[in-house]
Image (spheres, helix red, strand yellow):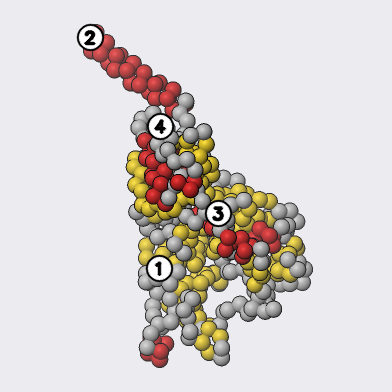
């Protein structure tokens, strides 16, 4: 008996010792370098000696080094990876810049490693993209700067020329749904249908500015919330997405920093207990890649996992209540998704083809969900024609209106005209 107790005591001591060693290792762990990473394995003297293949080799070497330093029991779970697979490496137009795309399998989906590697969740795992700028320094090639692809694009000569020639898209304000107004480069909200307006501080610069240097003076439906109880817009500053909101009808405004992001299609929903936001976190190959975040206190934000939905080119993200949410993607077959468990799982939802219109035209012109809203206990969905739409009456594009009483199945109600009118 004494011997058994001694053995058990020894095992307990060993486990405790291992745990203690692990805690010490985690305490002193330093995440792998990105900016500041250096290698002397390439003995080229200056940037003229580095062709595209040389830059690609440098980027691959960094990725392998990062993977090696982020594996194993000595790495805290928040920074640990199981595998990093290189997808592509591309030498870019500006000297010293190279883009690397990769697929990451994580030990745990922790925000620390997701942020460090600029990751976006997809059904295949976590994908990441970075643009690295290399310089030769004291005999080494060193990463001097880490950018997201969209940040690099802003530095290209073409984009700089675009930035130096600012533009503004003007749209007429809707009389029927008057909740905001943009005038003289200022954003206003109204709670009485346009009798009185309250200015949103810095709203024009932060909310209306797009990543292509255009100021949009029409805000898409589902991109903002304006009610007496809660008013909110997604704003962007220094490559970060920020919730700009008021809880007292515009008397005071607050900002809540959410996550890295840039101005593309943006979505805000406010349910009884939760604020849901969705915005683009990366761009590649002409596609925007999205995240969905939620908060109950407007201070801390957590990610909604949506592994069942491809993460690119959202046209609508709308939450009817804390558990029921919808995601629609740009005109693709089977591009409308529903969750009834707060985003834990999404399923594809089909809505019926308007047979009478198909019989008349020979095809279904409605293939892109544009907005959703609730009215009198029902959920409505407006489906447009996408960028290639040409089904019009009296010069105005036709859209389809759908209705749902249970939030799951939709019926076609008829054709509508629902396009903003460009002015000026």
Determine which of the numbered discs, if any, sits on residue 75 in the image.
4
Where's the N terminus, which quadrant? top left
Q: Can you identify the residue that label 1 sits on?
A: 335
Which badge, 3 or 2, is on the more N-terminal residue?
2
Residue drawn 37% across and 69% down? 334
What is the number of the mark on residue 3?
2
Q: Nearer the viewer, residue 304 or 342?
A: 304
Between the C-alphas of marks 3 and 2, the distance is 66 Å
Q: CA distance from mark 2 to mark 4?
A: 36 Å
What label sits on residue 107 in the rendered view? none
- Label 4, secondary structure: give it: loop
Q: Where in the figure is residue 361, as x and y percent of width and height?
A: 40, 89
Which residue is found at the position 50% from the left and 81% from the top? 399
Q: Which residue is mark 3?
A: 151
Q: Is residue 313 above or below residue 87?
A: below
- N-terminal of the pair, mark 2 or mark 4, is 2
* Sequence-first disc among 3 and 1: 3
| Left or right: 293, with 170 as reference point | left
Earlier residue among tags 1 and 4: 4
Residue 184 position (above or below residue 57)? below
């Amino acid at each position: 008996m004494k011997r058994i107790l001694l053995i058990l005591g020894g095992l307990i001591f060993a486990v405790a010792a291992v745990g203690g060693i692990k805690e010490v290792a985690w305490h002193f762990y330093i995440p792998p370098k990105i900016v500041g990473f250096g290698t002397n394995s390439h003995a080229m003297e200056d940037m003229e000696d580095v062709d595209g293949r040389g830059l690609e080799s440098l980027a691959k070497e960094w990725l392998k080094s990062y993977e090696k330093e982020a594996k194993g029991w000595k790495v805290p779970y928040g920074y640990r990876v199981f595998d990093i697979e290189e997808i592509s490496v591309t030498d870019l137009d500006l000297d010293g810049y190279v883009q690397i795309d990769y697929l990451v399998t994580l030990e745990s989906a922790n925000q620390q490693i997701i942020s460090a590697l600029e990751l976006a969740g997809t059904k295949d795992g976590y994908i990441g993209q970075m643009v690295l700028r290399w310089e030769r320094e004291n005999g080494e090639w060193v990463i001097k700067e880490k950018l997201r692809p969209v940040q690099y694009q802003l530095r290209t000569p073409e984009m700089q020329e675009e930035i130096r020639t600012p533009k503004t898209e003007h749209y007429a304000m809707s009389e029927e749904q008057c909740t905001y107004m943009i005038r003289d480069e200022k954003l206003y909200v109204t709670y009485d249908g346009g009798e009185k307006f309250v200015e949103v501080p810095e709203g024009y610069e932060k909310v209306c500015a797009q990543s292509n240097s255009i100021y949009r003076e029409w805000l898409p439906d589902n991109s903002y919330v304006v009610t007496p109880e809660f008013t909110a817009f997604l704003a962007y500053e220094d490559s970060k997405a920020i919730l700009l909101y008021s809880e007292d009808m515009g008397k005071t405004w607050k900002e809540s920093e959410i996550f890295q992001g840039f101005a593309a299609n943006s979505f805000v929903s406010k349910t009884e207990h939760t604020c849901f936001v969705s915005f683009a976190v990366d761009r590649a190959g002409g596609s925007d890649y999205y995240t969905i975040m939620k908060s109950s206190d407007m201070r801390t934000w957590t990610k909604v996992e949506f592994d069942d939905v491809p993460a690119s080119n959202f046209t609508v993200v709308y939450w009817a209540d804390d558990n029921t949410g919808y995601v629609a993607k740009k005109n693709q077959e089977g591009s409308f998704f529903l969750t009834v468990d707060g985003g834990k799982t999404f399923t594809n939802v089909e809505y019926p083809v308007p047979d009478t219109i198909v019989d008349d035209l020979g095809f279904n012109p409605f293939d892109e969900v544009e907005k959703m809203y609730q009215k009198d206990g029902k959920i409505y969905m407006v489906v447009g024609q996408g960028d290639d739409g040409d089904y019009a009456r009296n010069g105005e594009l036709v859209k389809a209106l759908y209705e749902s009483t249970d939030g799951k199945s939709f019926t076609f109600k008829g054709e509508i005209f629902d396009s903003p009118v460009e002015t000026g």
